[in-house]
Amino acid sequence: MSEAPPNLGPAPAGGGEGRQGILFVISSPSGGGKGTLIRRLLDTVPGVGYSVSWTTRAPRPGEVNGVNYHFVSRDEFERKTRARGFLEWAVVHGNLYGTTRAAVRHELSRGRDIVLEIDVQGAHAVRAWRKLKKSVASIFILPPSFETLRARLTARMTERPEELELRLRNARAEVEQYTHFDYVVLNDEVERAAEELSAIVRAERARRARQEWVARRVLASFGASAAR
Ligand code: 5GP
């Protein structure tokens, strides 16, 4: 993300005790526009947190350590890997990126939802975690075309030419991975795509399996059922 995500808001309606948070895994190729859509999501839907990843990539102008990423050396990253501090990590476009285990566990156990903005390898790893399976909803943000992707990446001018080419070369293999995700959002028009992403978050929260504890509480308020 190129701007600071907002502070974590309150837990979703009925949140707190009894509720297990949802892990929203969001992937797209570089330039797919997920940063903008995620920012919109965090601004508009309360109770969604953002997991700040660790990376060995150098900060871009305007990026803030601890906000956009925890920017660390390769040594520091590898120490964390050895200490089993990552829920998942991957080499992406030549740099290391990882999601810390502690932050995710903490948020989920408090009943908060959390967004992981990670690449397709990371998404694969998170989906494979048996313990997390029921907590994960995965979303792939699809650019409308390769040309749009190239135009967006070129226009943002955040990569050196060779880095940009590497990202474009990797894009096709990344887009092919859409088949493994629960949802696909076509990012052809930001307003519409942002709306769709919020709708997915709201719908996932309303799944019966996730509302069991609320429904049971409501049911209990009716008292014991009268025998007829
Ligand atoms: P960027 O360098 O453009 O910020 O990110 C490059 C890629 O790394 C993006 O696809 C982004 O989603 C991914 N990425 C960011 N954080 C993580 C992470 O913690 N784990 C994994 N696997 N990928 C990440």
Image: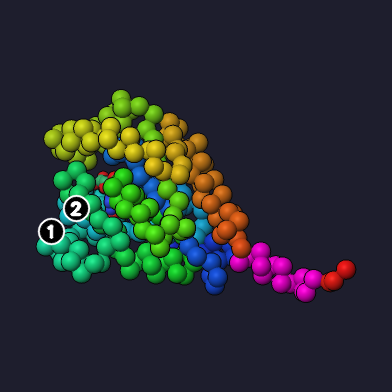
Q: Which amino acid is tagged 1? A: Arg
Residue at 39% x, 59% y: name it: 130
Q: CA distance from mark 1 to mark 2?
A: 8 Å
How are the residues colored?
rainbow
Residue at 28% x, 57% y: name it: 88
Is residue 189 part of the magenta span, yes or no? no
Residue 172, image x and y in percent? Answer: 28, 32
Residue 11, image x and y in percent? Answer: 51, 64
Residue at 19% x, 43% y: name it: 93
Observer-nearest of 221 and 14: 221
Q: Is residue 80 above or below residue 176?
A: below
Q: Which amino acid is tagged 2? A: Leu
Tag shown at residue 96: 2
Secondary structure mostly taken by the magenta-highlighted segment of the chain:
helix
Q: Is residue 56 above or below residue 181?
A: below
Residue that sits furthest to the left in the current view: 75
Is residue 224 part of the magenta span, yes or no? yes
Magenta-colored span: 213-225
Residues at marks 1 and 2 touching, judged by CB atoms closer than 8 Å: yes
Look at the image and tell me whether residue 9 can be seen.
no
Residue that sits furthest to the bottom in the current view: 224
Tell whether circle 2 marks a residue whose Cβ is less than 8 angstroms from ligand 1.
no
Residue of label 1: 74
Query: Mark 1 vs mark 2: which is more N-terminal?
Result: 1
Observer-nearest of 109 and 69: 109
Other-residue count near label 2 (Cα within 10 Å), few / some / many at <14 / 14–19 / ≥20:
some
Residue at 72% x, 68% y: name it: 219
Observer-nearest of 188 and 223: 223
Tag shown at residue 130: none
Q: Is residue 199 above or below residue 210?
A: above
